Structures are given as C-alpha cells and as structure tokens.
Amino acid sequence: MNHLPLPAYILPLVATATLAVSLSAQADGEKPKPAAAKPQSLEVARELAAGKFAGYTYVGNKPAPKTIDEATFVVATIEALATKNGVKLAADAKDKLQKAVSLDGHKKKDVQAALVAAAKLKKKKVIGFGDLPAWASGVQHALVEAGLGEAIDASKAEPGDFVHWWFQYKSGNWGYHVGIVESIQKGRAVIYGAHKSSLASERKAASADRKGGIGSGPLLQLSAKDKKLFVVRFKAAAKKGD
C-alpha cells in the first residue's frame, strides 16, 4: 500500500515527539550504549595471567608443568588479541609467529655475531647500534610480517605496545627480553610479561627464593644507548571490503 507524504506542518510535530521519547528514555537511565572498544594487549595479557596461566612460574632449565617463558607468553597474548579482534590465525601462522618471537631457527653464534657487528663501542662500552637483520627485532618483525603490527620508535612507545630489547651480559655476550609496556614514567617503562627473576612482587625475596612468573617486571629506559629496543603496536589486519 502506498503512503502519502506527511504535510509540511506535521513534520516538526513528529520531530518534537521523537526528541521527547529520546529524552524520556535517557531520563529513565536508558543511555545509548557506546561501541565496544577493541581489546588491548594489556587487558588480554592480564586475562591470560589470571585465567589460562594462573599460578604459572617461570620455566627453568627443564620444561615442567605450569611453567612459562617470556616469548611463549607474548605469543599467547598476540594470538588471543588477534582472536578478539576478529583475526583467526592458521596453524602455520601461529608456528611462524612463535619462531619469530623466540628467534627459533637462528644459531647462537650467528645471533652473537650480528650483535657484535652492530654494537658501537667507546672504551669498551656500548654507545649505540648500527643496522641489525630484520629477524633480530623479534616480536616487531613477527607482527609487521604478519600484517598485525606497526613498528614504533621507542621514544613514542605507549602502554600496550610490545617490546623486544637486546642487552649485554658482563661476559660480553648478548641476550634479549620481550614483553609488553605496562606504564611509562619519565622515559622508563614498566614491562609486563613472564619474568624469571625481576617480578615486582618478588623484589624483596632472596634470589634463591624467586620462582618468577607473570606480572609487572623490570624498568626499561626507553632511550638507553647500551640496549637495542624494538617496539611494535598491534594493529588488526583490515578485512576485505573495509
């Protein structure tokens, strides 16, 4: 059935009635629901720590039940974050992600050689770095290659960003850590993740009594010259047609 258009003098009355109903609904507490925010990495990481990985300690020299390392926790966070953002990772993509974050497949001697070649020294102290292979950026390389991240300069890091950093032991060898920026104050970031001996909750405990686990960890100077930082921000891949 065809409807005749409303006369012009009726339209203002309809608009007024609609506004009145809207105001009445708001007065009764029926406020418009805001769009749900995209899940953030810290939120997801904390959910995993309180749920799936509750009670886990840091893995020792030999794998044991309810233990975890930093790379595995970061990968689990990324997988859960991707899922909550509508991105389903195939089995091979998950495997590739794990290997990239943990640097699996790279021989220790090759890793050490790359860091030695890149480190700039002055009186035997590291004062900066030259170029490193893409794989050496760990989680940054993993997310960018997967189309799930944007490389960020360390000076522009924000809570929720993933960070991989290289540091030098007293022996001269190089090691790395990976985690999530939890907070930043005066250029220093608190790193959330799985930690072996630097959990904030265990700082007063004797070294022998520290079991490690998931939570707030070390402070990381974002402008440190003797460390090489790689920061990446999770960014869900756009769906076709977007």
Image (cartoon, rainbow, N blue to C red):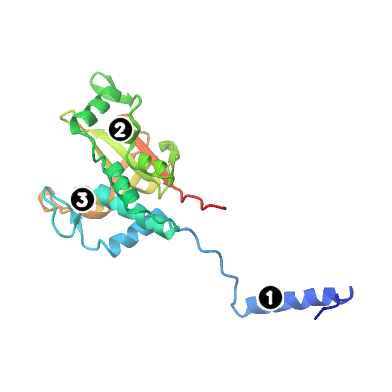
Relative to 112, 146 lies left or right = right
Q: Position of residue 178 (x, y in %)?
A: 29, 44
Q: Which residue lies at the image location 22% right of the left edge and 50% below the top edge?
A: 69
Instruction: Using a 10 Å C-alpha cutoff, classify the residue at mark 1 as few (fewer than 14 neighbours), some (14 to 19) or many (20 or more).
Output: some
Q: Which residue lies at the image location 37% right of the left edge and 39% below the top edge?
A: 141
Q: Amino acid at mark 2?
A: Lys
Q: Which residue lies at the image location 56% right of the left edge and 69% below the top edge?
A: 33
Q: Which residue lies at the image location 23% right of the left edge and 31% below the top edge?
A: 111
Which label belongs to residue 83? none
In the picture of the structure, the residue carrying the numbered disc 2 is: 227
Q: Position of residue 136 (x, y in %)?
A: 31, 34
In the picture of the structure, the residue carrying the numbered disc 3 is: 203
The reply to whether residue 22 is in sight is yes
Task: Work out whether residue 101 or residue 146 is closer to the camera in this orientation and state it.
Answer: 146
Could you say whether the residue bearing mark 3 is in a helix, strand or loop?
loop
In the picture of the structure, the residue carrying the numbered disc 1 is: 22
Q: Position of residue 134 (x, y in %)?
A: 35, 33
Task: Work out whether residue 202 or residue 31 is closer to the camera in this orientation and state it.
Answer: 31
**Vertical arrangement, residue 113 with respect to residue 209, above or below:** above
Res. 10 image quadrant: bottom right
Could you say whether the residue bearing mark 2 is in a helix, strand or loop?
loop
Could you say whether the residue bearing mark 1 is in a helix, strand or loop?
helix
Q: Pointers 1 and 3 in contact (CB under 8 A)?
A: no
Tag 1 or tag 2, which sits nearer the N-term?
1
Q: Amino acid at mark 1?
A: Ser
**Vertical arrangement, residue 8 with respect to residue 108, above or below:** below
